[in-house]
Image (spheres, rainbow, N blue to C red):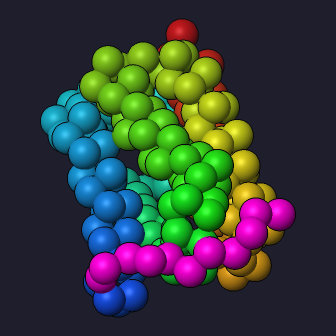
Amino acid sequence: MLARERAAAPVHPWVGLAGFILLCLAAGWIGSIFTGSSVDTWYQTLQKPPWNPPEWVFGPVWTVLYVLMGIAAWLVWREYGFTGAPVAMGLFLTQLALNILWSGIFFGLREPGWAAVEILFLWAAVLGTMVLFGRLNRAAGWLFAPYLAWVTYATTINFAVWWLNK
């Protein structure tokens, strides 16, 4: 396990919390740029599996998940800083980038097949972040559990959409 290091951040801890939550919400906003008109046009034309949720569910679920991710990252950062947990924090940032990339591939490029491949990398990065965060701060690890569950669910939808629309 990494040696503990107090985050020598020049900011108040609550400002750090807000920053991590805003970072995660910003990733969601960037991803939503790709979904834009695709949800109203192209996505509507696709066959979807029976377990696909109504569209109105996605916004609230993702908002909650991004807030939980931000809190988890903040808990680790508060105890270890970036230098005390470089692999965990790096993987956290990587999974955020993969989250954005999935939206770009699925909705922006309209490529469910390639998105199905990419979401496997996203799933692995989320699991890895959850495990590493959990080793450093148990609560931070558990805060990633709903995200892992949602990405697992989203993976089944992604593969089904690809299969049904080949």
Counting from the top left corner in percent of width and height, residue 134 is at 75, 69
Residue 142 quadrant:
bottom right
Counting from the top left corner in percent of width and height, residue 35 is at 26, 38
Which residue of the protein is positioned furthest toward the right in this rendering? Answer: 1
Task: Say if 116 sits above or below 58 in the image.
Answer: above
Residue 145 quadrant:
bottom right
Counting from the top left corner in percent of width and height, residue 113 is at 54, 16
Whether residue 12 is visible = yes
**Which of the two residues, 83 or 31, is positioned nearer the viewer here?**
83
**Which residue is located at x 62 percent, y 75 percent?**
5
Q: Count all numbered tags in the image, as a single digit.
A: 0
Asked whether, in this view, residue 43 is left or right of residue 85, the answer is left
The secondary structure that most of the magenta stretch takes on is loop
Which residue of the protein is positioned furthest toward the left in this rendering? Answer: 37
Whether residue 126 is visible = no
Asked whether, in this view, residue 67 is left or right of residue 1, the answer is left
**Which of the two residues, 82 or 69, is positioned nearer the viewer here?**
82
Asked whether, in this view, residue 114 is left or right of residue 144, the answer is left
Residue 61 quadrant:
bottom left
Counting from the top left corner in percent of width and height, residue 44 is at 31, 34
Q: Does the magenta portion include 150?
A: no
Quadrant in which the N terminus appears: bottom right
**Which residue is located at x 39 percent, y 24 percent?**
105
**Magenta residues?**
1-11
